[in-house]
Image: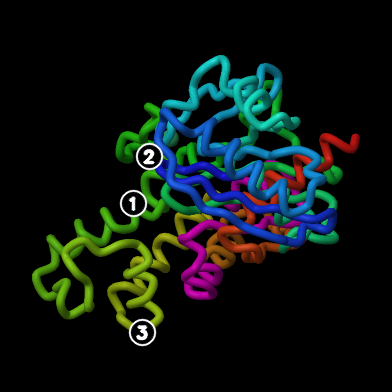
Amino acid sequence: MHVTGQQLRAALIDGTGKILETRDAAISPENTVERAATVAADLGSKTGNVLAIGFAIPGLVNRQTDVVSLSPDLPSTIRDGLHSDLMRATGLRVELENDANAAAYGEFKVGAGRESRDMFYMMIGNGIGGAIILDGKLWTGSSGFAGEVGHITIDAEGLECVCGNTGCLETVASAPSIVRRARERLNRDSTSSLSRLGLTKNFTADDVAHQANEGDDFALMMIERTGKYIGTGVASVINLLNIERIVLGGGVMDAGQLILNPIIQEAKRRAFQPCFEATQIVAAKLGRDAITIGAAMLAQDAALS
Ligand SMILES: [Zn+2]
């Protein structure tokens, strides 16, 4: 299961990670546990043999205590009894996990990370998350928070980030940051206009990517610059971990080669060359299902181990 602001997405998967059934439900802070239990019961009735539930949350999950420590998007999940309430309500083993960790595990098992042993995953969407898989296992750090690549500093003089630091990668390369940067530039440059770009007043990062795909110069430049920022972060990951494979997922990567190419070029330019040459940088394969598949596979593997 994967919860976001007002949505719960659940998938019933088999032992190979194949999705058998999915459910989407609207949730509120008050009814999340109850809705999760209803959906679990519904999916459970399809097979009668659900082993465990993986519950992915956009926030930091302390894996020692099974408590969400931080979640700007879903503050209602930060409470002591969430894990035990979910287990009681569903009658099943529940694994709470950070959404990027879950997506990384999904990509590693059945997506773009297959057949690698060590992998770094980056999820670039409304925020930027990351996860490290070493020797086939999620390496979550001493308290479960490892991989927060979105909060490495790209610009020491940059804008304030939700985390309190300034100039984090997330402040320039997340989907809302792309919109903000595009807006700032459009406001400065009187020859550019939203209408010329086919952008509406409330345009999104997807719209910018779409316009870039249509060949618009300005949109293309915005996507390329975003790729450069991400590539700068990727170079740091390469230098730090000398990792076999880096998988890039999340909504911002929907721009495809238009963003992947500048990421690879910038990583090549900045990373220590022998490390860069040892790393494959690839786009994720599972799309938005990565989180639900990965959460379920984490829970499955935990239950079987
Ligand atoms: Zn930050």
Q: Which residue is pictured at 64% across the width and 47% down the height?
A: 42
- Res. 62 image quadrant: top right
Left or right: 85 in relation to 202: right
The type of residue carrying mark 1 is Ser
Q: Earlier in the sequence, mark 2 or mark 1?
A: 2
Task: Please provide percent x and percent y for residue 214.
Answer: 36, 84
Count of number-bearing discs: 3
Region in magenta: 234-262
Which label was assigned to residue 167? 2
Q: CA distance from mark 2 to mark 1?
A: 11 Å
Left or right: 101 in relation to 226: right
Of the four image quadrants, the one with ligand 1 is: top left
Note whether 113 is above or below 190 in the view shown: above
List the residue tagged with mark 3: 214
List the residue tagged with mark 1: 177
Q: Earlier in the sequence, mark 2 or mark 3?
A: 2
